[in-house]
Image (cartoon, helix red, strand yellow):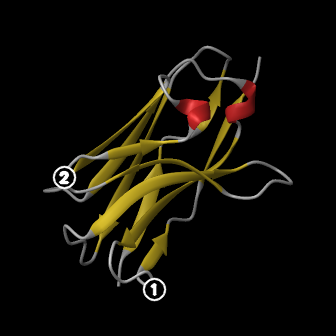
Amino acid sequence: QVQLVESGGGLVQPGGSLRLSCAASGSISSFYVMGWYRQAPGEQRELVAQITSGGRTNYADSVKGRFTISRDNAKNTVDLQMDSLKPEDTGVYYCNAVHALIGQRNYWGQGTQVTVSS
């Protein structure tokens, strides 16, 4: 069983920065892709960024050039550095870990609120 715990959300002004962190406990092998999703009020949950154990990344077009995902395989952590934040980045951000070969092994954190507002 895998447990994911996020931290680092909060309120920030447009143009500001926030860093989200996710710590995984349990068995996270190199087969797990880790990532961040977000859900705005009234909207579906959407992918923000993903990273493999080898460091390959994938970003939503809306965050490319502004957000950076990183991963520490030894510590089982994944971070999301968010710069140049916009009001449309507001939402609940969820950490995710999914096994690349066994899709049923798909785990979520409890979510952390990010609000971008002046």
Percent x, y of residue 88: 74, 31
Q: Residues within 10 Å of mark 2 (few under 14, many from 20)?
A: few
Q: Nearer the viewer, residue 7 or 99?
A: 99
Q: Callout 1: helix, strand or loop? A: loop
Instruction: Name which residue type carries label 1.
Output: Gln
Q: Residues within 10 Å of mark 1 (few under 14, many from 20)?
A: few
Q: Which residue is mark 2?
A: 54
Contact between labelled residues 1 and 2, with CB atoms less than 8 Å apart: no
Percent x, y of residue 8: 48, 41
Instruction: Name which residue type carries label 2.
Output: Gly
Relative to 87, say whether 29 is above or below.
below
Q: On the rendered image, what quadrant is the C terminus found in?
A: top right
Q: On the rendered image, what quadrant is the N terminus found in?
A: bottom left
The Cα atoms of the two marked residues, 2 and 1, are separated by: 21 Å
Q: Callout 2: helix, strand or loop? A: loop
Relative to 12, say whether 106 is above or below.
below
Q: Which residue is mark 1?
A: 104
Percent x, y of residue 75: 18, 56
Percent x, y of residue 63: 56, 31
Relative to 72, say whether 68 is above or below.
above
